């Protein structure tokens, strides 16, 4: 692929995902020093990147609880984020809503938010799989030791 086509494909992928947005249906609770994200099903990758920026600027600790899957996983590496000790995290290839079509470049956008073993697994196959791979909070931390389990939710500080 020529270098001049890469930016165009990236823009097309972003536009397609923006136009085909789906609601994440997450429960978001802001209270005291915390913002809790509970059972986030993911959704639009570009919308999640925007939400990530807002959460980073919030000045509050972002606690990811319950089942965080798909685009929600982009929030875990926020500098002010931690994951609940009982959280489950699910990864699958990004795709256009209600289809099995994996748009080009979107997995690269998502992968830029991952670190260490999570990033390796993402680019090692999770990014192309339509099947959900679900791991526990503890397993996530084993793959990405920079991630913290929320001590405010009864987990050990990491």
Image (cartoon, rainbow, N blue to C red):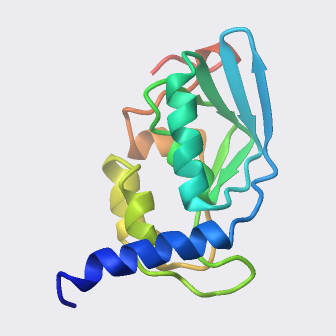
Q: Quadrant of residue 111?
A: bottom left
Horizontally, residue 149 falls left or right of residue 42, namely: left
Q: Position of residue 10 (x, y in %)?
A: 38, 73
**Image quadrant in which the C terminus is located:** top left
Q: Is residue 135 visible?
A: no
Q: Is residue 133 above or below residue 156?
A: below
Tell me where residue 49 appears, x and y as whole percent.
Answer: 52, 49
Side of 1 relative to 81 (left or right): left
Q: Position of residue 55 (x, y in %)?
A: 57, 30
The extreme top residue here reads: 32
Query: Which quadrant of the structure image shows residue 133?
Result: bottom right
**Extreme-bottom residue of the structure:** 1
Quadrant of the frame with the N terminus: bottom left
Q: Is residue 16 above or below residue 69?
A: below
Q: Is residue 108 left or right of residue 22?
A: left
Q: Residue at x 64, y 27 (%)?
A: 63
What residue is drawn where x is 37% and y is 66%? 108
Q: Is residue 152 visible?
A: yes
Q: Choose between 133 and 48: the one closer to the eye.
A: 48
User: Which residue is found at the position 49% from the left and 27% from the top?
Assistant: 148
In this rendering, is residue 140 above or below 112? above
Please give the count of numbered marks on the rendered protein. 0
Residue 129's spot in the image, x, y percent? Answer: 53, 78
């Amino acid at each position: 692929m020529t270098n001049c086509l890469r930016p165009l494909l990236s823009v097309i992928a972003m536009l397609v995902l923006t136009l085909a947005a789906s609601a994440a249906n997450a429960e978001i609770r802001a209270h005291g020093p915390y913002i809790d994200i509970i059972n986030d099903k993911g959704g639009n990758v570009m919308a999640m990147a925007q939400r990530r920026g807002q959460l980073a600027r919030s000045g509050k600790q972002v606690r990811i609880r319950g089942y965080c899957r798909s685009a929600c996983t982009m929030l875990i590496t926020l500098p002010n984020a931690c994951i609940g000790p009982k959280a489950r995290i699910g990864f699958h290839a990004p795709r256009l809503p209600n289809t099995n079509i994996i748009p080009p470049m979107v997995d690269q956008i998502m992968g830029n938010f991952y670190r260490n073993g999570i990033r390796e697994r993402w680019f090692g196959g999770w990014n192309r799989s339509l099947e959900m791979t679900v791991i526990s909070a503890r397993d996530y931390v084993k793959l990405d030791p920079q991630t913290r389990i929320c001590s405010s939710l009864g987990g050990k500080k990491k």
